[in-house]
Amino acid sequence: MLVWFSDWQLAEERLLITVGDAVEWELYPADAAWVTRLFGDRLAVEWEYDTYGDAVEQPSRRVRGAVVDVRRVRCVLVHDSDGLGPLPGAAVMSPVLDTSGSWITETTAPVVADPGRGGLDTGWRSYTSIYGNGDVEFPFGYAVTLAVDDE
């Protein structure tokens, strides 16, 4: 089973998911439009972990199993009619051991002070602190493969 985790929710909760973890999660239907925006038709994700999923009436599924794979999802940002978002269909995945990259400062993009922004950093540290532009790939989340006990 493939499960989507949004970068900002992992950062907010400091939720650490590691390959090999035994987990029990309440999952909700994945946002198909969002997954399609990121991957086009290259990846199908039916379920997502949503820390606010119980705030609305919707189906859910309780699963128990083992994490067999964690892949970080990154994509270049573009300005379009919806505002700032991922370049449609261009998300890339890379294997990682855990989700700690959502809240630990990374060094893949330079972080420099911008005098035009009162000395604020022009780089990023997490999805919630993104601004700027360019060809830098930004984190959007994780695709986690789960071996479910009841399947």
Image (cartoon, grey):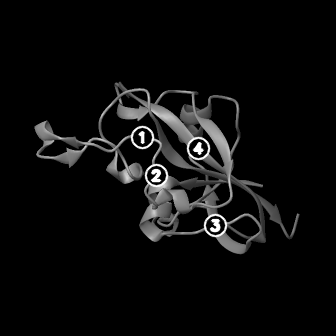
Does label 3 or label 4 sit earlier along the sequence? 3
x, y percentage for residue 101? 52, 57
The quarter of the displayed image where residue 69 is located: bottom right
| Disc 4 target residue | 73
Check whether the beta carbons of the residues at disc 1 and disc 2 lie within 8 A of each other.
yes
Q: Amino acid at mark 2?
A: Glu
Q: Amino acid at mark 4?
A: Val
Q: Name the residue tied to disc 3.
A: 17
Q: Secondary structure at mark 1?
A: loop
Quadrant of residue 66 within the rendered picture: bottom right
Identify the residue at horizontal 48%, vertical 69% (top origin).
14
Circles 3 and 4, Cβ within 8 Å, touching? The answer is no
Task: Please report whichever mark, 1 or 4, sits nearer to the chain's N-terminal start.
Answer: 4
> Which residue is labeled 2 in the image?
106
Q: CA distance from mark 1 to mark 4?
A: 15 Å
The residue that disc 1 covers is: 109
Earlier in the chain: of badge 3 and badge 1, it is 3
Locate residue 97 relative to residue 114 in the image: left or right: right
Q: Amino acid at mark 1?
A: Ala
**Element on which disc 4 rests:** strand
Mark drawn on residue 119? none
Q: Quadrant of the N terminus?
A: bottom right
